[in-house]
Amino acid sequence: MEYKNIWTMAETRNGNLKDVSFELLSRGRALADKLEESLVSVVIGNNVNKEQLNELILRGADKVIVVEDAKLSDFIVETYSNLLVDMIGNYRPNIILSAATVNGRTLMPHVAMRLHAGLTADCTDLDIEEETRNLLQTRPAIGGNILATIKTPDHRPQMATVRPKSSKPLDIDESRTGDIEYIKFNTSLLDNRVKKLESKHEVGGDINIQAAEIVIAGGKGMKKSENFTMLKELADNLGGVVGASRDAVDRGWATYPQQVGLSGKTVTPKLYVAVGVSGAIQHLAGMKTSEVIISVNSDPDAAIFQVSDFGIVGDLFEVIPLLNSKLAKEVK
Amino acid sequence: MNIIIPIKQVPETSNVKMDPETGTMIRDGVESIINPLDLYAIEVGIQLKEEHGGKVTVITMGPPSASKALKEAIAMGCDDGILITDRKFAGADTWSTAYVLAEAIKEIGEYDLVLAGERATDGDTGQVGPNIAAYLDLTLGTYISKVEEVNKEKIVVERLLEEGYEKLELPLPSLLTVVKEISYPRLPTLRGKQRARKTELPSLTVKDMNVDESKLGLKGSPTRVVKIETPKVTRGGTIVSAKDDDQLEAAVDKLVEFLKSKEIV
Ligand SMILES: Cc1cc2nc3c(=O)[nH]c(=O)nc-3n(C[C@H](O)[C@H](O)[C@H](O)COP(=O)(O)OP(=O)(O)OC[C@H]3O[C@@H](n4cnc5c(N)ncnc54)[C@H](O)[C@@H]3O)c2cc1C
Ligand SMILES: Nc1ncnc2c1ncn2[C@@H]1O[C@H](COP(=O)(O)O)[C@@H](O)[C@H]1O
């Protein structure tokens, strides 16, 4: 049986689909059209919201495969990997895309190893090579200093994780139709060795800088912890969240989950505002692919200005409060 | 508690300068260091050994010069180092790298925990840790930010997620990949450095291992790099100055206009 069709892995949390599930469909749709193959969204979880399953179809999927079971409500990589390996054996997809999230970056390498499949991490661009119909996967490497294009000529499925927020979901198209197939979870695939004891969700929601459309990041130039309230205010004015450079995190002005960069998170928001951040290469690695970058820095030679679409050379303690007061008026 | 830590030698990137004209990396004088994210794994490994006894073995797959990374880890407090080196490994992607490291770990045997870095700062995939776990059928914890409890049979850890943390209990042996939050790496000591100098580093080559040669190096790697580009670093944006009050007012107004033009406000 030949390998055919494109799969995108939906992600669920408490029965709801995360945004990345829809973002991946716009990637998958473009590939499916080029190859003239079907686009299938794969959903693993428990009690998944039915309306959202249909939304997967309205936003690009030709088919949805759902595996639901109480035992699948927690992400346990061994069980999920057993299940996915089993499904791949039965359906033989040509391409599998997953979001480059904590769970996507755990499950995909686990599965790829077992299948001797090629896997490309954290792609920012995907295309089809015309002559060979192979998947071309482009990703930043060496701290974002190079872009490498990778293909997997002789192994199937071709697997890739895709950077969250690097594409937008397609608009809902009410005229689209497709099948939703439920498959029964075969409990022999259950792996009971690892137990999830509890989960703690951060209050305030500031923590998920990767899912945010707008990130306001503070650096060492913020001088002290209390000054971050200024950034929170800016974030509230613009509808975003607060991130930080490593220096700010190391000084305890922000928490590690807020850290952007090589040893923190990679973000691709619509807008990134860097305040009192110098733009060290390790910081740039985590935010360079943002759609729009704005920076405020008193040093005209700061490297952050090189990657900025708009920069103000000035004292952040003057610029940010004035900006906040002007924005507050705009919002009204 | 015996711990194996795969570490990678990478080019030192904190001093990397980009040529603004050509957009290429200036490589002159770029030194090789231990992957900075592996230092956190080394630190937790040493701490666990100090608390529970046993030993820490660092392993690396790379050219003979990668033994420098092993020596550095020993200078920090690791006990043994093994260099996995062979021309046949050249060009390995994450699949093939993990295959060789996993076979080496099997060869070493007798371990309770494998600790890997979250990702290497050069290849930047974060795949090798989970790959090794899958190949050896070791239970896996990724993005681990804290070790809460360890005994002979199990380890309780905290895992960093996008929207918070979760607590997992894993049996031993397991493989964990760790994030920066887990530890604060110590510096090598003088005594450590002396010990490192005296420590013999055995090496493993293809003939010492039970590996299938068709799975090694470039030939054994499912993926192929077909193109490398160096993206332009500069965006050539608008930079305005706000040195005095008038300039400040104008600059902030211009920024608000810019935000409007991008439909953010
Ligand atoms: C292996 C490794 C991994 C790393 N990982 C990361 C990472 O993930 N993320 C990260 O961010 N860094 C990382 N770094 C650190 C990185 O090299 C830089 O040290 C760090 O990004 C600098 O943080 P900063 O820009 O906040 O501080 P600085 O470089 O000190 O910059 C502060 C800036 O604030 C400006 N400023 C000061 N006062 C004012 C004012 N009143 N108004 C306006 N501007 C002002 C200054 O001009 C300066 O440009 C890593 C380093 C290494 C070696
Ligand atoms: N060649 C190698 N030798 C030893 N360990 C490695 C090697 N490559 C990767 N690793 C380990 O795997 C982790 C993830 O690397 P990567 O998947 O390349 O981002 C690293 O932090 C190391 O712990």
Image (cartoon, helix red, strand yellow):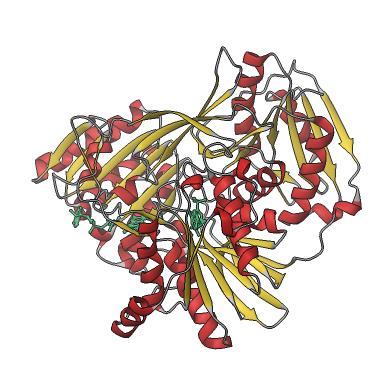
Residue A278 drawn at (x, y percent):
24, 51
Q: Is residue A20 above or below residue B179?
A: above
Quadrant where the C terminus of chain B is found in the figure? top left
Residue at coordinates 50% horizontally, 81% vertically from top-left? Answer: B47
Q: Residue at the front extreme?
A: B207
Q: Is residue B97 left or right of residue A146?
A: right
Quadrant where the N terminus of chain B is found in the figure? bottom right
Residue B71 drawn at (x, y percent):
37, 70
Residue B108 drawn at (x, y percent):
61, 69
Q: Is residue A300 left or right of residue A194?
A: left
Between B111 and A235, the one lying in front of the other is: B111
Q: Is residue A109 above or below residue B58?
A: above
Q: Is residue B167 above or below residue A42?
A: below
Quarter-of-image position of residue B234:
top left
Quarter-of-image position of residue A162:
top right
Q: Is residue B113 visible?
A: yes
Q: Is residue B161 visible?
A: no
Residue at coordinates 85% horizontally, 45% vertically from top-left? Answer: A68
Total marks shown come to 0
Q: Residue at the left extreme?
A: B244
Residue A7 drawn at (x, y percent):
71, 31
Between B135 and A137, the one lying in front of the other is: B135
Q: Is residue B5 left or right of residue B75?
A: right
